[in-house]
Image: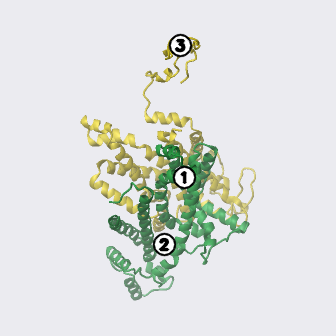
Amino acid sequence: MAWYIVRRLLQMIPVFLGATLLIYGMVFLVPGDPIQALAGSKPLTPAVADQLRARYNLDKPFLVQYLLYLKGILTLDFGTSFSGRPVSEELARAFPVTLKLAIMAVAIESVFGIFFGVFAGLRKGKLFDSTLLVVSLIIIAVPIFVVGFLAQFFLGVKWGIAPVTVGGDASFGRLLVPAIVLGSLSFAYVLRLTRNSVAENKDADYVRTATAKGLSRRRVVTVHILRNSLIPVVTFVGADLGALMGGAIVTEGIFNINGVGGALYQAVTRGEPPTVVSFVTVLVVIFLLANLLVDLLYAALDPRIRYV
Amino acid sequence: MSEPDSTPAPRRGRQERFVAPPDEVKILATDKLDESGQPTSIWNDAWQNLRRNPLFIVAALLILFVIIVVAFPGLLSSQDPRYCNGDFSMQHAGSGHPFGFDKQGCDIYSRAVFGARASVFAGVGATALFVLIGGTVGALAGFYGGLLDSIVSRITEIVFAIPLMLAAIVLMQLLDSRTVWTVIVILAAFTWPQAARIARGAVIESKNSEYVLASEALGVSRFRTLVRHVLPNSIGPLIVVTTIWLGVFIVTEATLSYLGVGLPPTEVSWGGDIARGQRELRSGSPILFYPATALAITVLSFIMLGDAVRDALDPKARKR
């Protein structure tokens, strides 16, 4: 088990390097001079420009810049953004908010998705199942920005039962509606995955055996059917945590949440390589760690899975 | 198959036999093999199943409608979607303008009709590239294995780790001139590993089958075996994800246009119109509803098609 974790962590290194190099290369190719953008409309003497360029390592070749950046990350020094503040400060401010939002969204989508998915799967082909399938299709088909905007307009503006925007106060109550919006699409996927998985397993021989030996229906469903049906669902939910954090840009924009999405979007439009790459790097690490966690969870769900 | 009706009346009172005569046993009907027809392939079988699936019929009709709208928008609207007259700003529906006008005085109905082009074109183009690159790379990696497989797997992991929206926003921001083509290339560039993974898995599953062994025993070349035997038998899962991704691509294009980093504002697109309509919602005007509904119906039809095809290609799911 320990060996397995060590090996998985080692396997993450090339993925981590590749992903950061890719993003760094993309941001590096931004046309225009970031130093000029930093100075704004003020005229810049060549000497000052050169000095700024040297401070941000912009005078060195691309690969050297990347390696210097990598060295910084490994010593947990994420550099300074063009506004002069350390990037790590921005990371520390934005990530807890988005992490909270994404975890809430994942919790909502898993609880409701699995709950409804089990009932739909057990009643495959019945009215309840068909209704839920249609609902899930509609959720998938309507873009998240429409869902978010309608939720904000009706719940926030028109009926006033939820705060319109989140702003600086990212408390549980204020993040609830945005989290529901963010998790809605994945809710539909979790529902469908669980439903298909349960429908496939509910007629399995081991289920008949469990029923035949006199177990209660509840125990058969929760212990025998559900546990065996959860592996594809857990895989999806684990990968979804990382995806939601990166994909929260739209939701954060609509509800004015000061999270990763907003900070990242601004950094991208301003063309700030250190900030963009640092945010993406942390997102990639979270994604990889979440996937490792999922793989470790497999063993808890299915004791036949052994780590070697 | 109908059961024979001409069952003789059971003879009562006489028990000289305990086994009914062959012509009395109804089960005989199912034992008979109809050898006259052509053997059906999995595709034929799937088609027979699809034809009877109401989900498929609804999806196919909707897609047909979308195709007509994309190919001949003039059939549904004679208005020029780019003709905007400030005098008509926010005017309500009138004759010839069933949905009214937006802030700039453009006809909402004709913009909803003509907007289909950009969305569907971006979706279909990205999907085509997605399948072509991902399917080819995945199939080769799965079939030949070795170094190629290792490289493809590493690339897949790297691209998986980068969120699609994020990469798309960063790259779109880089480009000075954005067209439908740039959207297509960027969407495909960051998603093809998804197709590659599916194709790889399907090819690995069928490459150890007896018919592959037979093909090789007969001296058929490796590549020909892949193309003639392995691919046709492993393309099912790829077709299913393709229809689903088509919907995802259309939504992603709309999201990018909504964020202002997709198609240029001069292009008539649903995403851009939704972004504009959103501003008017605050003042109580529901014009956002029209492009959003058009988008949702289009995406819905492709996802429903994917659902129906998956059920048809998966005999296990069909079993009740």
Vertical relation: B90 (above or below) B38: below
Q: CA distance from mark 1 to mark 3?
A: 50 Å
Q: Residues within 10 Å of mark 3 (few under 14, many from 20)?
A: few
Mark drawn on residue A268: 2
Q: Find chain B in the image and tell me its colour.
A: yellow
Instruction: Please tell me whether mark 1 or mark 3 is closer to you in this view.
Output: 3
User: Quarter-wise, where is residue A255 in the image?
Assistant: bottom right
Vertical relation: B64 (above or below) A48: above
Q: Chain of mark 2?
A: A
Contact (Cβ within 8 Å) of mark 1 with mark 3: no
**Same subunit, tags 3 and 2:** no
Q: Is residue B128 shown left or right of residue A258?
A: left
- Which badge, 2 or 1, is on the more N-terminal residue? 1
What residue is at 41 percent from the left and 43 percent from the top? B235
What residue sits right under mark 3 in the picture? B15
Along the line of sight, which residue is nearer the eye, B147 or A38?
B147
Q: CA distance from mark 3 to mark 2?
A: 91 Å
Dot 2 falls on a residue whose secondary structure is helix
Mark drawn on residue A274: none
Chain assigned green = A
What residue sits right under mark 1 in the picture? A219
* Amino acid, disc 3: Gln
Q: Chain of mark 1?
A: A
Along the line of sight, which residue is nearer the eye, B64 or B243?
B243
* Amino acid, disc 2: Val
